[in-house]
Image (cartoon, rainbow, N blue to C red):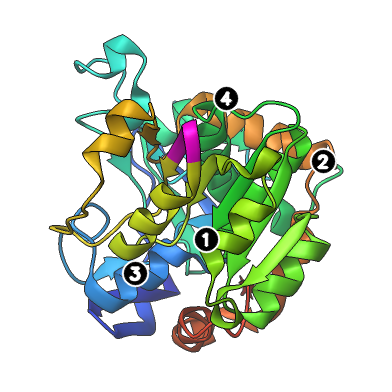
Amino acid sequence: MKMKAVRFWAPNDIRYEEVELAKPKEGEIVVRVEAALTCGTDVKTFRRGHPLLIKQTPSGFGHEFSGVIVQKDEQVTKFEIGDRVVCANSAPCGECFYCKRGEYELCENLELLNGAYAQFITIPRLIVEKNTLLIPKNLSFAQAAFTEPLSNVIHGISKTPIKQGDVVGVMGIGPIGLMFARLAKLKGAKVIAMGRNPLKLKMAREFAHADIVIDINKCPNLEEVVINNTNEKRGLDVAIECVGLPEMWEKMFSLVRKGGCVHFFGGCASGSKIELDTKRLHYDEVKIISSFHHTPQYFKEALEMIASDKMDVNKLITRHMDMKYAKRAIEMHRDGEVIKILLEN
């Protein structure tokens, strides 16, 4: 069976072309893609490739999606043809060193999935078994497609010590930063959102309900402004970096108070280095944490949160486009013209 799909050939070279849809192997299902979203990780991959997601070329592209099961291997009993499902882009093996310790996001044999920018996508057995969920009836395909990105944020928030009344600063307010800011608000924090893009600054108010929104292009004295808006002008209780630039990692470290916590969420390019004041780190007891990816538990929690109406993810979709224009959509996402683009067949 032939289908149309976007494939990654090289950095800055993705093509919408006709490919063969393989029949499902043991334990696999085939999903007709009803909604797929652009993502910052896809933008990074488009620009420079990705050592984990793109191991050979040409490769499928895109990983945030939802759809309908149209084929399944006879051994699959958990789902039926016609079921509305959302699938994660990975599943842990459950048997390696890290899985045995419950650190599933660090699985040494993580089953990864790319190829959501297509008419159909074949879901590997492990993901069918561990990270595929039925979409609640009250959710649209577009809303369900946010499950994967939100699961990363829920994982990150679970590791971040945010208490009622804390002042939390979020640097970088793309979709991930906006969701971090929203979850921090839901935990009772005062949120300071920092970014450059006018559309994202607007969304920090309307979606995340940030208390203070700072355009860092117009704020030469950022450190002073931020610290003046914290409890007793001590500095941020929690600083979350969602940009993925070494200089921003260092900036967020400078904004946190004694005893505070810095969460380096944004992934920098491989080989990047930062410089930190060891005196501050040690004598001020500044905590540094990071988080990567998600687990089946956080994926499940993300879908439940979307279904609960605590996070209106529809607001993050600022454009709809046909799947064949995926390259243009990625370029628009890269250039900050949108928050998320919903790609549809």
Measuring 22% from the left and 54% from the top, which residue is drawn there? Answer: 274
At label 3, the amino acid type is: Lys
The mark lying in front, picked from 4 and 1, is 1
Q: Measure how far apart labels 4 and 2 are at the Cα level.
A: 28 Å
User: Is label 3 in contact with label 2 (beta carbons under 8 Å)?
Assistant: no
Badge 4: residue crowd in 10 Å (few <14, some 14–19, many ≥20): few
Type of amino acid at the residue the image marks with label 4: Lys
The residues bearing labels 3 and 2 have C-alpha atoms spaced at a distance of 29 Å
Residue on which the image places disc 4:
78
Q: Is residue 33 visible?
A: no
* Residue pointed to by mark 2: 310
Whether residue 117 is in magenta: the answer is no
Instruction: Pick whichever, 141 or 23, lies toward us.
Output: 141
Which mark sits nearer the N-terminus, 2 or 1? 1
By secondary structure, the bulk of the magenta-drawn segment is best described as: strand
Indicate whether 343 appears above or below 168: below
Q: Which circle's residue, 4 or 1, is located before the other in the chain? A: 4
Q: Mark 3 points at which residue?
A: 44
The segment highlighted magenta reads 257-262
**Dot 4 and dot 1 residues touching (CB under 8 Å):** no
Q: Earlier in the sequence, mark 4 or mark 2?
A: 4
